[in-house]
Amino acid sequence: MSENKHICLALGGARSGKSDFAESTALSLAKDHGQSAVYIATGQAFDDEMKARIKRHLDRRDPQFTTIEEPVDLVSVLKSHDHRHVLLIDSIGVWITNLMINDLDVDKVMADTIEAIKSASCSVVLVSDEIGMGIVPENAMSRAFRDHIGMMNQNVASLADKVAFLVAGVPMIIKS
């Protein structure tokens, strides 16, 4: 990894502060290296609650970010940005959900995305949910989601030079 390319994974549960941490990390990297900060939003507004959630995210987002809405094709986004950018992908869990509801080959898309992260010349900050600490879900789709996100988190963490686990807004650096 070049000295100006960084990969950071921010993990946590719901309302843990992972997005805030990732946003400040991406902006700090961009400022330190004279790069542009690009926010890759994976959410889709399927209902009024999600529309309101997306609006809240947009309203509080720092204006230094350029926002790209991309619910599925992260590979193209990663390939279309270079060393002049820091990409913030929020979030892996929503993205995996999008892959599943679109009946895509999730394992293949995840593998292709990991390869794109590896070969990208830009820095990448990713937000993901840590859901593996709870009970085994009762239905097959929930278990598949848990397995997919667990594998994606492991693969991203293996590439990352920094992994933070957030609890109650407090980051615990588990890899640096």
Image: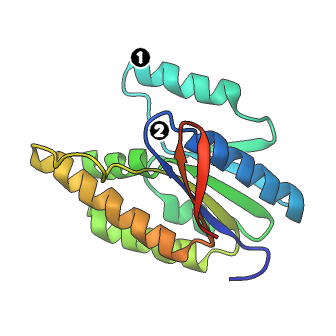
Q: Where does the N terminus fall, quadrant-wise?
A: bottom right
For label 1, the SS is helix
Q: Is residue 136 left or right of residue 150?
A: left
Look at 63% across and 74% down and name the residue there.
Answer: 120
- Report the front residue among 2 and 137: 137
Give the quarter of the image for residue 84.
Answer: bottom right
From where the camera sits, is residue 106 visible? yes
Q: Is residue 24 left or right of residue 99?
A: right
Q: Is residue 61 left or right of residue 156?
A: right
- Name the spot of residue 67 as percent of width and height, x first: 67, 42
Look at 53% across and 73% down and name the residue there.
Answer: 116
**Which dot marks residue 97?**
none
- Name the spot of residue 110 as percent of width and height, x first: 38, 67
The 10 Å Cα crowd at callout 2, few under 14, some 14 to 19, many 20 or more, is many
- Name the spot of residue 144 as percent of width and height, x first: 20, 55
**Which dot marks residue 43?**
2
Q: Which residue is mark 1?
A: 48
Q: CA separation, marks 1 and 2?
A: 13 Å
Amino acid beneath label 2: Gly
Please give the count of numbered marks on the rendered protein. Answer: 2
From where the camera sits, is residue 103 visible? no
User: Is the residue 73 above or below the residue 113 in the image?
Assistant: above
The 10 Å Cα crowd at callout 1, few under 14, some 14 to 19, many 20 or more, is few
- Report the front residue among 115 and 171: 171
User: Is the residue 65 above or below the residue 156 in the image?
Assistant: above
User: Is the residue 9 above or below the residue 114 in the image?
Assistant: above
